[in-house]
Image (cartoon, grey):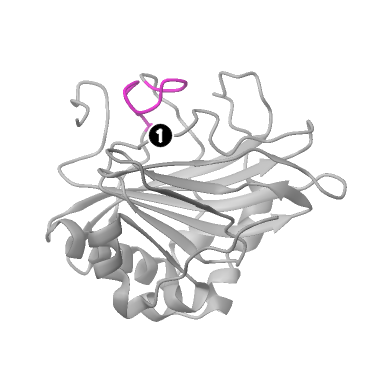
Amino acid sequence: MSLPPPLTPPEQLDTQLREHGFAVLGADGVCQLAACSVAQLREWEPGWNALPPDNYLKDGGRYRRRRHANFVIEGEQLRPVAHRAHWQPVEYNALHGGMERWFEPMEAAIIATPAWTRLMLALGRIASALKGPQPWYTEAHQFRIDTAGGIGRPTPEGAHRDGVDLVAVFIVAREGIKGGETRVFQDQGPDGMRFTLSEPWSVLLLDDERMVHETTPIQPADGQGHRDTLVVTLRAGGFQGPGVPARG
């Protein structure tokens, strides 16, 4: 049985993140903060049908497809950054860390829309309320995890932090699957929670400095299925890359 997520009213978001290290907003709350409509967000969903395979999976799987984009958020300005490799240190990703992963870029059909800019700027405001105003080095990832091989792993690296300041995991679609339970834990403490994100364009927000997260594997419930997400990370001080020290 899947457990519903504990939704936070938008007006309580900053307090919830500050006091507990994570928060979940329903789609209406996301749209309230980003000044957009659910219909505008759902216009992007066909883009998840055209994701190329992730050719870097070290577990030998063929269950993940993705695209990647980079931006800098500074105040109320969103600046695209030239396409670059995604890189994480092994301290945060023991499976795929320490390697440059060149994913195909996100398509302009999504990132050129006004709603995309408003959504990214909303995340920048959330990060600044949590950590203080500053430029935010932002990476966006479209993911599709499928069950064509019988099982798909949203987080093959296991429970982890990402080495950033704020993580936003938007659920885009769940089709024909079971599993995919989200689990969040305090990095330095015993408290944790588990639930299943299912409402399209609801979002889990994490203070990555304090919280560890993972999503359990998915299995087919009725033929082949998939789980689509948009994951956005915001980091102070610069993008992660070779030679950039990992945070403690």
Q: Residue at x 16, y 56 (%)?
A: 131
Q: Left of 106 or right of it: where is 133?
A: left
Find numbered disc 1 in the image and state the secondary structure of the residue it sits on: loop
Where are the magenta residues, as a range? Answer: 85-97
Q: Residue at x 60, y 19 (%)?
A: 59
The correct choice, above or below, for 44 with respect to 167 in the image is: below
Disc 1 target residue: 160
Q: From where the camera sits, is residue 178 visible?
A: yes
The 10 Å Cα crowd at callout 1, few under 14, some 14 to 19, many 20 or more, is: some
Q: Position of residue 55 (x, y in %)?
A: 59, 25
Q: Position of residue 39 (x, y in %)?
A: 58, 78
Q: Position of residue 213 (x, y in %)?
A: 43, 42
Q: Quadrant of residue 210?
A: top left
Residue 71 among those drawn in magenta = no
Q: Quadrant of residue 130?
A: bottom left
Q: Nearer the viewer, residue 228 or 51?
A: 228
Q: From where the camera sits, is residue 35 visible?
A: no
> Which quarter of the rendered picture does the C terminus lie within?
top left
Count how many numbered circles sit on residues in the image.
Answer: 1
Residue 90 among those drawn in magenta = yes
The correct choice, above or below, for 23 with respect to 219 in the image is: below
Considering every residue shown, the one lying at the far front of the view is: 190
Q: Residue at x 61, y 56 (%)?
A: 47
Query: What amino acid is found at the position of numbered circle 1 in the picture?
Result: His
Q: Residue at x 43, y 47 (%)?
A: 184
Magenta-drawn stretch, dominant element (helix, strand or loop): loop
Q: Position of residue 7 (x, y in %)?
A: 46, 70
Q: Left of 178 or right of it: where is 135?
A: left
Considering every residue shown, the one lying at the far right of the view is: 223
> Which quarter of the rendered picture does the N terminus lie within?
bottom right
